[in-house]
Each structure stands twice: as structure tokens, then as C-alpha cells.
Amino acid sequence: MKRLLCLMLSLLLLTGCGAKEKEPYVATGNGLSSEKPKPPEGSQVTAQSLSLALFPDRSLSPFQCTDITNRVIFSLVYQGLFAVDSDYQAHPVLCSRYTVSRDMKTYTFYLEEASFSDGEPVTAADVIASLKEASESAWFGGRFSNVEAYKTTDEGAVEITLTTPYENFQLLLDVPVVPKKQIDRERPVGSGPYIYEEFDGQLRLRRRSDWWCVAELPVTAQIITLVSGQTMSQLRDEFEFSGLGVVCADPGSESYVDFHSDYELWACETGVFLYLACNEDSKVLKPKLRKALTYGIHREALVEAYYRGFGKAAYLPASPDSPWYSTVLTKDLRYEPEKLTQAVTDSDAGGQAVVLLVNKDDGVRLRAARAIGDSLEACGMKITMSELATQDYVKALEKGEYDLYLGQTKLSANMDLSAFFAPKGALSFGDMDDSVVYALCKEALANSGNYYTLYKQVLDEGMLCPILVRSCAIFVQRGMFTNLNAARDNVFYYDLGKDPAAARGETQ
């Protein structure tokens, strides 16, 4: 079931990340200052007239929703223990401070005196219920695979015990927190600055006057209209002709449409990772040849041709924006097809068919796979495309009926690769599970300085050939924002001005 979840996830997922403006947000929260921040003398804060796009026939549950257009709304309604910025740094939100055990396997998170929009306090039980619900969801599933237990302490804190040491576990804790008793609701209340309300039979957002904290938000509107559409074409028309303020779209989707009006645009990373993976039992792809595959793929051309420029070439199995992406390792990995041609010649594999498996229900990925196949053939390989619908694609993966497959998954914010290399890992098809590489995965989780060694080993073995990390597009009416600093799964990112380092207490 875990493998099936990951494969279905590869068809559904995208989330917003984005621009890296560095203006700090001024905020007050519990434990920081009792005074609300004031605008600079002589300035005025003007409330926007803002509307956001909504697909009403798709979920608004923060756990069940997999639609990136609808998920834009969540960053205004919900908060997590932490918020992750576009530099992959975790900033405390509902967490006031936290401690870590010496073996880095027990984290204890103390909570702010925060409240939901219904006036109820945010409790440890709410946090634990939300994390558990997220662990079973398509959007967040997999990131908590190393959690052993949750516990509420006598002090009302959240204690989480892990099966393996983590240095940056807080990067995974940007999960929306909702009341435990509302966990199954389609629109549970949140602790964020806006609340859902019905007006004249239409759903909209209203700014809370009783918000538990105060922060300088990129959004100043008192009321945010939610403009409904059944298709992206309808939302595009609402944007161009009716003044719809913000639309988040997936340029890698078959339903994507071009916008033609005047607008501001952010290309926002999603964490969705496209890669080639090899079958260990392949009679053709021996280690030297599969290691050389990287030279035969023009990643930048794929980004432009099939993802409309919304993505970044990835030569390592990580986001190029993550702090652990090593340019030292990638400096000699650029597109050099002659190197693959030589490897094919040396391997005597030129006349042997290589089966390239792809899910044909993802039209963009299918076309990218065909282009990759053409590139590999130009280097002397003989490629046979296996283009299967989702269920048959899953079966072929499970049975190892391929030499290569073009896969897609959403990398967690801490770039954990365990799903590929762990025994019975959700993505360890084709006997990819490897005790040595899996051990390196765990070492990297325990100490991020070990990511270099992990990535080098992955490249040396050649079982995984990274291609690109995808982005989404945020279309904004010109002049709408001056301080939009979108982050992954958090288009309207803000923090509470708390120092992440200061929030971490002494190791216990």
C-alpha cells in the first residue's frame, strides 16, 4: 500500500514555493513582545482588494487536498509547529521552544498560548492528532515513517520519539494543526490569520480580529473573495477579465493553460522530483553504463520544452535550492552525450533493447520520457518504450518488468532518500534497496554534513539518475504585493520573528 500511495502521489502532487525576497517580517507572538508592531511613521497600511482561485469540487481539507490551487488558501487559515521558508529553514510558529535528546531521537515541543478561530486553545492533543492524520495522507504521507511514538507531557508539550536520529526533524513539522475533534471535517478551523465564512451563499475568508499573534503579512485584505471555477481555463478567464487576484497553476499538468494578460509571475519550487531509476536485474544496464546515463540527458532542455521553464535541472537527488545540494559534486555532470556514447560502445550494449517504462496517464511525463528515449538512442542505445496506464504501470514496477523507469515523487523538506534504498522502501523497485546507501541516508538525517557522502554514493552506483525538480506558477495581478515571499506549500509565507536557533533549547 505504501508503494501504491507513492505512485498515486506522483500523479497528484504539487505545492507552492517561491521568490526569495529577504525583507524580514516583523511579528509579535506569545513570549516575544506585548506590543503590536506599528507601521513606520507617516505610512499607512492599505487593505487590499484580493480574491483567490478555488476549485469547489476539490477538497479543502488540509490533509486530503492534493490540488495546488486550493492549497494556496491554507497558508492563511492554518499554522504548523514550524513554517519552512524558501531557503529550507524551519521557523517556529506554534512551537515556542523545543529540546532534543542527546541521541537525537526524542524531540519535545513546547507550545505557544495560541488559539483557534473558534476561541479554543491549541493543545498538544490537537498537534498529535494532526500529525497522525497527516502521516496517513497522500500529501504528507511518508515523511513520518521514522516516528515511533507521540506523547503529551505533563507540561502540555508534544514529545515525539523517532526510530533513528534526526538533526532537522523540525523541517517536517509545517503540517497544518487543527482541533482534534475536527480532524475529519472538510473545513476545520485553524489558528491562522483568516477564517472561512459563508456570505450570500458564497465561501470567503475574513481577517480575524482576535488572532492570537500579530505579524506583518503579505496579505492585508479584510475580506478575501474565493472565485470558483471548474477548469483552469475558467480561472484564467476570471483572472484576465474579472480581476481574480491570484491563481496558482501547474505548468506540468495537461490542464495547464497559458495566461495572456498583464501579470506578475513567480516560478515556485514544489519539491516534486523527476528521475530515472534502474532495475538492478537489468541484463543491459551494467554499473558503468547506468552511471554514464546522466551525460545523455539534456535536463535544461526538458525543463523548457515540457515544463514550460517551471523547474530546475537536478544532477543530485535533491532540490537545487536545498542547503545540502553540492555544486562540487555536480560540476562535471553537465550534458555531454559523447561520454554516454563511449560508455555504450565500451559496454557492447548498443544492439540490446533497453525497456523504458513510463506512466502514460501523465501526458507531460510521457512526452518527456519519449524525449529522453530519443536522447539515449542518439547516444547508441536501443530504447523500447513501455507506456502503461497507472494500474499496469504499478504492476510492471512491482514485477521489475523494465530496465529503466521515469518516476516522480515529492521529496520531503529534509531531502530524505530512505524510500528508495530502505528494505521494502516505498520506492525501492527493481531491487534498489541497498543496505550501504540506506545507512548513509540515516547518517545524513542524523548529521546533514553527511549528505555529500550520500549523494556521491548514489552517483557512483548509478541506480538513480536525477533529472529535475518541478515548480508551480503563481499568477498575480500586477502591483498586488510588495513583499510576497512564497515558500514551499506556503504561498503567503510569514514567520513570527522568532530566532530558530534561540528556540532550540540545550540538548538533554
Image (spheres, rainbow, N blue to C red):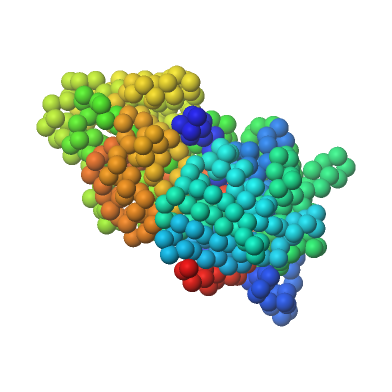
Position of residue 81 in the picture relative to residue 227 (left or right): left
Nearest the eye: 316 or 333:
316
Q: Position of residue 15 (x, y in %)?
A: 55, 45
Picture layout, residue 145 above or below residue 217: above
Q: Is residue 109 above or below residue 239?
A: below
Q: Residue furthest front?
A: 154
The picture quadrant where one finds residue 399 is top left
Nearer to me, 431 or 231: 431
User: As drawn, is 479 to the left or to the right of 307?
Assistant: right
Residue 215 x, y percent position in the rendering:
68, 67
Residue at 65% of width from left, 44% of height from top? 62
Is residue 222 something one can see in this rendering? Answer: no
Residue 36 falls left or right of residue 169: right
The residue drawn where x is 68% and y is 41% is: 61
Looking at the image, residue 289 sits to the left or right of residue 103; the answer is left
Image position of 389 with respect to 93: above or below: above
Residue toward you, 412 or 422: 422
Residue 145: percent from left, percent from top:
48, 44
Furthest toward the bottom, the residue is 41
Residue at image coords 45%, 38%: 409
Q: Does any portion of residue 280 appear in the rendered image?
A: yes
Residue, x 43% and y 64% (percent of image)? 102
Instruction: Say how many tags the image has.
Output: 0
Q: Residue 97: horizontal and vertical position, in percent?
A: 58, 67
